[in-house]
Amino acid sequence: MEAITFKAFAVANEIDLNKIAIHCGIPKKFTWEEPLVLKEDILSAILHRSAGQSLQVLVFSFGSVVFVNHTRQGEIDSMLYFLKQFEPDIELLQASLYTDDYSLHREETDTLQWTDEYVIVPEYEAFYPELIATVLAKSVALEKIEEQLGKIHDKLEYMIERFEKGRLRIGNKELAKTTAAIVRHEYNSLGSIMILDKPDITWANSSAGMFYDKMLEFFELNDRHTIMKNKTEVLYRIMEGFSTISHSNRGLFVEWIVVILIVIEVVLSLLEIAGIA
């Protein structure tokens, strides 16, 4: 058996699989946990060339695309251009920013063997390609979100520097935008990707469940998920502190305005009394 190659891209925050399915004439409603698999005649129509049984493209609702046994860059570009018709947020020039490669090999061995570039199996199972593609898709999507988290950290660092310089007031708009960025990050990482959820085949087939768990462990998805969740909680605490300080300063400012107005009113009253006298 020849090696099966996988190339994954994280190209968007989410992709509407049902729009693509309707366009391709696939009579099925897709949910978040299952990928849209494009192959054979449908794939041939998209790529404008004959696609053999070994060629596949798996599109995931959380914005990842995995190419199976595709070696031509032109095919990858054509598919991404096709997907952009349904998801305008896909940036074709930046599609290669979050990508990873992997492969599946069958050899005479007693046990499964994992490396950074491939996995070796003693016997081929039909569920291997989809499970590998799923883990790879989640991994590159997580990589994309990890970088977005870094940008949020940079923004908070700038806000902290302002606080250190005594500039304690932060506008509601700025607070809202930063909080929205954190909420979006949490939704994308903990909501859309669903790291802890497993494909249906893993519940029905113990071998598939074991293989999927080992893939998760090898790509450290659970650990990366936990780290991101903890960092998100820290971000929320920091934003809560910023909001409290900013609102306190606004309250203090309002109090001073009230005091000044009272003083002005008293002064005007005294001047009026002095004028009468």
Image (spheres, helix red, strand yellow):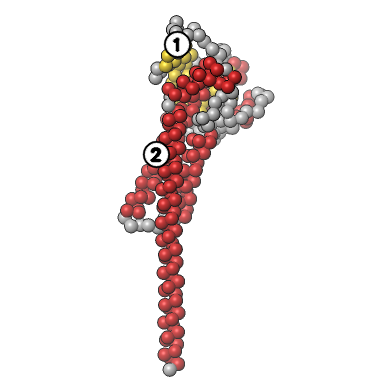
Q: Earlier in the sequence, mark 1 or mark 2?
A: 1
Secondary structure under badge 2?
helix
| Depicted 29 relative to depicted 107: above or below | below
- Which element carries disc 1, helix, strand or loop? loop
Q: Which residue is mark 1?
A: 111
* Horizontal side of residue 19 vs 150, given as left or right: right
- Could you tell me how many numbered marks the image carries? 2
> Which residue extends farthest right?
27
Q: Compared with residue 41, is residue 195 higher up or lower down, i.e. above or below?
A: below
**Which of the numbered marks, if any, corresponds to residue 150?**
2
Name which residue lies at 43% across and 81% down.
266
Residue at the front extreme of this rendering: 206
Residue 126 in percent (x, y) is at 56, 13
Residue 218 percent location from the top left of the image: 43, 22
Quadrant placement of the C terminus: bottom left
Q: Residue at x 45, y 28 (%)?
A: 221
Answer with left or right where residue 162 lies relative to residue 262.
left
